[in-house]
Image: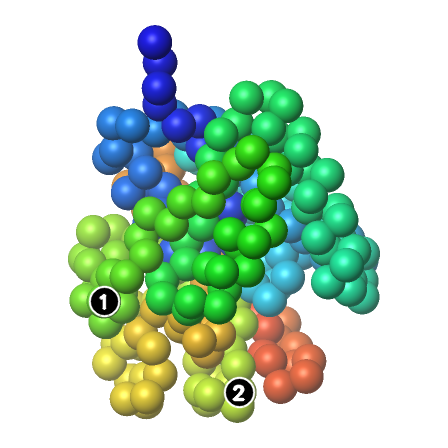
């Protein structure tokens, strides 16, 4: 009898999602069925990360995994969010998915919300990288080949000039001491363009920067082929 958990991973396009996938792939008790992500249907981008939907799809292609895109209206109330995602969770369960994995690290209220969201759905919540020390983890990600760019910076917590920088040792060393090195408090968000998990890197180029409500977003596109 096959007792492995059939897992879908919540996908943000950033480094924590990649690392959660890396950890899941090392486990023998799970089968990774695919990814899912929510997007703002008005902008056609991942919320907060500001990453274009086509880039998320390109990541999934490089990972050789299917991805489910869940469009959300803008603005989106909590009630609408829970109703829409809840219908997708029901569909996932009907297809044999048993577990939803998240790349959260230490925010207890976020974890409790996700667990509550799955109550009564027949789906289990899993947090494969929960509790890891984020300073050590950030450097491990970099040392083991995770290459990412900062796509969103919260200018209330870090200088806006950090948006568009690479997530590397220099970036980590330059952060103010009170800032979490993985940005778990929302200080910054990333897009991963290369990782040992990809079949090949994603060639990217940066575009314009825009400021909205104190957040500075750097546009990232697939670089044109020559």
Q: Nearer the viewer, residue 27 or 56?
A: 27
Does any portion of residue 20 appear in the rendered image? Answer: yes
What residue do we see at 49% from left, 60% from top? Answer: 112
Percent coordinates x, y for residue 222 in the rendering: 55, 50
Percent coordinates x, y for residue 182 in the rendering: 35, 69
What residue do we see at 41% from left, 58% from top? Answer: 104
State the image quarter where residue 214 is shown. Answer: bottom right
| Up/down of 217 relative to 94, above or below | below
Q: How is the image coloured?
A: rainbow
State the image quarter where residue 45 is shown. Answer: bottom right
At label 2, counting other C-alpha atoms closer than 10 Å, the crowd grade (few under 14, some 14-19, many 20 or more) is some
Q: Which residue is mark 2?
A: 155
| Up/down of 49 relative to 28, above or below | below
* Mark 2 secondary-structure assignment: loop
| Up/down of 9 relative to 209, above or below | above
State the image quarter where residue 67 is shown. Answer: top right
What residue do we see at 66% from left, 41% from top? Answer: 69
């Amino acid at each position: 009898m096959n007792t492995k958990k059939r897992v879908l991973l919540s996908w943000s396009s950033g480094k924590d999602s990649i690392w959660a996938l890396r950890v899941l792939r090392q486990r023998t008790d799970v089968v990774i069925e695919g990814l899912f992500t929510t997007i703002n249907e008005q902008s056609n981008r991942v919320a907060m990360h500001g990453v274009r939907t086509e880039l998320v799809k390109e990541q999934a292609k490089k990972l050789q995994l299917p991805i489910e895109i869940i469009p959300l209206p803008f603005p989106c109330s909590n009630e609408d969010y829970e109703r829409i995602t809840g219908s997708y969770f029901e569909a996932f369960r009907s297809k044999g998915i048993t577990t939803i994995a998240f790349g959260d690290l230490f925010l207890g209220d976020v974890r409790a919300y996700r667990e509550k969201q799955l109550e009564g759905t027949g789906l289990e919540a899993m947090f494969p990288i929960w509790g890891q020390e984020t300073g050590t983890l950030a450097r491990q990600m970099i040392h083991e080949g995770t290459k990412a760019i900062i796509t969103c910076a919260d200018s209330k917590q870090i200088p806006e000039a950090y948006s568009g920088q690479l997530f590397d040792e220099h970036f980590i060393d330059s952060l103010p001491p009170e800032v979490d090195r993985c940005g778990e408090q929302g200080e910054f968000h990333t897009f991963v363009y290369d990782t040992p998990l990809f079949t090949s890197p994603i060639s990217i180029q940066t575009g314009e920067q825009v400021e909205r409500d104190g957040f500075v977003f750097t546009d990232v596109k697939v670089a044109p082929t020559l």
